[in-house]
């Protein structure tokens, strides 16, 4: 499994629109809507990410605030991108389980 910390970039603290917990970092999106190589640093408008707490799928707005991905957007994603997001959700869930196993006080 890849290291979850790879490609994690800080972002301005913002509450998750679904669970309200404040997110301070964004994982690298598996989906680059701009097709640019190399990717610019940090989240870009249109990038997808997930909430590390409730695993909801999020999209960055043009002003880099976050909102929930709509069902229409989800359906429009290429299959490999949707699969990448599901894999990421699974990886985050596993990482949280492991953190709990170590008695990490930040997980509750
Ligand atoms: Zn959340």
Image (tube, helix red, strand yellow):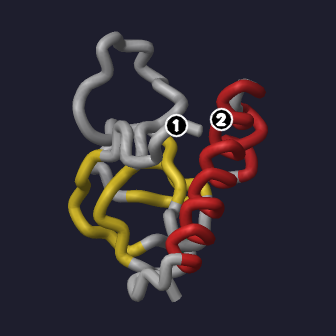
Q: Nearer the viewer, mark 2 or mark 1?
A: 1
Indicate the position of residue 53 as horizontal and vertical percent values: 53, 72
Local secondary structure at mark 2:
helix
**Residue 63 located left or right of residue 18:** left
Viewer-nearest residue: 83 or 14: 83
Q: Is residue 26 above or below residue 3?
A: below
Where residue 35 sits, quadrant-wise, is: top left
Viewer-nearest residue: 85 or 69: 85
- Count the marks: 2
**What residue lies at 34% left-to-right and 11% top-to-bottom?**
37
Q: Is residue 2 above or below residue 34?
A: below
Local secondary structure at mark 1:
loop
Verify CB contact (< 8 Å) between mark 2 and mark 1. Answer: no
Indicate the position of residue 105 as horizontal and vertical percent values: 40, 88
**What residue lies at 62% left-to-right and 71% top-to-bottom?**
97
| C-alpha distance separating marks 2 and 1 | 13 Å
**What residue lies at 55% left-to-right and 79% top-to-bottom?**
100
Residue 2 — which label? 1
Q: Residues within 10 Å of mark 1 (few under 14, many from 20)?
A: few
Q: Is residue 62 above or below residue 102?
A: above
Quadrant holding the N terminus: top right
**What residue lies at 53% left-to-right and 32% top-to-bottom?**
30
Indicate the position of residue 19 as horizontal and vertical percent values: 54, 79
Viewer-nearest residue: 53 or 57: 53
Q: Does the numbered disc 1 mark a residue whose Cβ is under 8 Å from ligand 1?
A: no
Q: Which residue is mark 2?
A: 84
In the rendered structure, which disc, 2 or 1, sits on the residue that comes first in sequence? 1
């Amino acid at each position: 499994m890849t290291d979850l910390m790879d490609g994690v970039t800080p972002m301005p603290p913002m509450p998750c629109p679904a669970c309200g917990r404040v997110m301070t970092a964004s994982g690298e999106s598996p989906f680059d809507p701009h097709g640019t190589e190399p990717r610019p640093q940090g989240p870009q408008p249109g990038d997808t990410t997930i909430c590390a707490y409730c695993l909801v799928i999020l999209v960055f707005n043009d002003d880099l605030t976050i909102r929930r991905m709509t069902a229409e957007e989800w359906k429009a994603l290429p299959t490999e991108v949707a699969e990448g997001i599901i894999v990421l959700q699974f990886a985050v869930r596993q990482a949280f389980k492991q953190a709990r196993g170590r008695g990490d006080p930040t997980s509750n």
